[in-house]
């Protein structure tokens, strides 16, 4: 299996949340900000580096052990945030990047370890899948860093991950929160009031 110490976790937390209408990542869910759930789920994996790419946030990722990189223009899309994170991972000498999204609160460490199991050297591209579509979290070997550094727009690494291996897990684990309705539905699954209180 791939050694986690070779991997930089790149947590993308710089989206503008246009469909959510508000500071989505700070919204409470199960007693903490939405964005902290994936960070908590992965806290015991000994990554070589933890990098959070942020923009204008009140959340303190540095307190969670992250190297914080500012995306000063999130309007350029997720691809730009990803390139910032990969550049920092490269500076830190990591051979792989694991790209995770801060608005996917149900991702588990067990699933990430399955991605590591599917790694196969510098050419690695391993994405998550709900059985239908590939998506983050996704793992990339350093042979793809140059391509990742050139990304822009909101497509991110979508074209790249369609060419890689796909590790299937439940759609429930890969839910991402785009709208207030998405968050209300997730809270309802846990028997929480939809206002998060």
Image: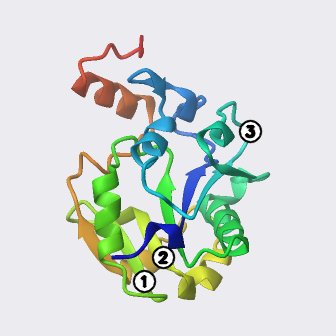
How dense is the environment of label 3, judged by Cα within 10 Å: few (below 14), some, or many (20 and up)? some
Q: Helix, strand or loop at disc 3?
A: loop
Where residue 163 appears, as percent x and y from the top left, is 38, 84
The residue wearing badge 3 is 56
Q: Helix, strand or loop at disc 1?
A: loop
Q: Does residue 35 sit above or below 141 in this rendering?
A: above
Dot 2 and dot 3 residues touching (CB under 8 Å): no
The earlier-in-sequence mark between 3 and 1 is: 3
The earlier-in-sequence mark between 2 and 3 is: 3
Q: Residue at x 63, y 73 (%)?
A: 151
Q: Residue at x 23, y 27 (%)?
A: 189
The earlier-in-sequence mark between 2 and 1 is: 1
Q: What numbered label is drawn on residue 93?
A: none
Q: Which quarter of the rendering shows the C terminus?
A: top left
Quarter of the rendering containing residue 177: top left
Q: Which quarter of the rendering shows the N terminus?
A: bottom left
The residue wearing badge 2 is 140
Where residue 76 appears, as percent x and y from the top left, is 70, 59
Dot 2 and dot 1 residues touching (CB under 8 Å): yes
């Amino acid at each position: 299996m791939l050694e986690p110490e070779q991997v930089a976790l790149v947590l993308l937390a710089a989206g503008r949340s246009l469909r959510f209408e508000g500071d989505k990542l700070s919204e409470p869910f199960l007693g903490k900000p939405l964005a902290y759930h994936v960070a908590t789920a992965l806290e015991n994996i000994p990554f070589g580096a933890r990098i959070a790419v942020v923009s204008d946030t009140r959340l303190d990722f540095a307190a969670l052990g992250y190297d914080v990189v500012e995306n000063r223009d999130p309007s350029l899309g997720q691809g730009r945030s990803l390139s910032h994170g990969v550049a920092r991972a490269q500076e830190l000498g990591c051979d792989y990047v694991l790209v995770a999204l801060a608005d996917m609160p149900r991702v588990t460490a067990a699933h990430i370890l399955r991605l590591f199991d599917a790694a196969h050297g510098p050419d690695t591209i391993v994405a998550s899948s709900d059985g239908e579509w590939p998506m983050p979290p996704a793992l990339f070997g350093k042979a793809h860093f140059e391509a990742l550094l050139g990304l822009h727009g909101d497509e991110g690494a979508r074209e790249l991950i369609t060419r890689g291996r796909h590790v299937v897990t439940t759609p429930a684990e890969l839910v991402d929160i785009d709208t207030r309705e998405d968050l209300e539905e997730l809270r309802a699954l846990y028997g929480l009031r939809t206002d998060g209180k």
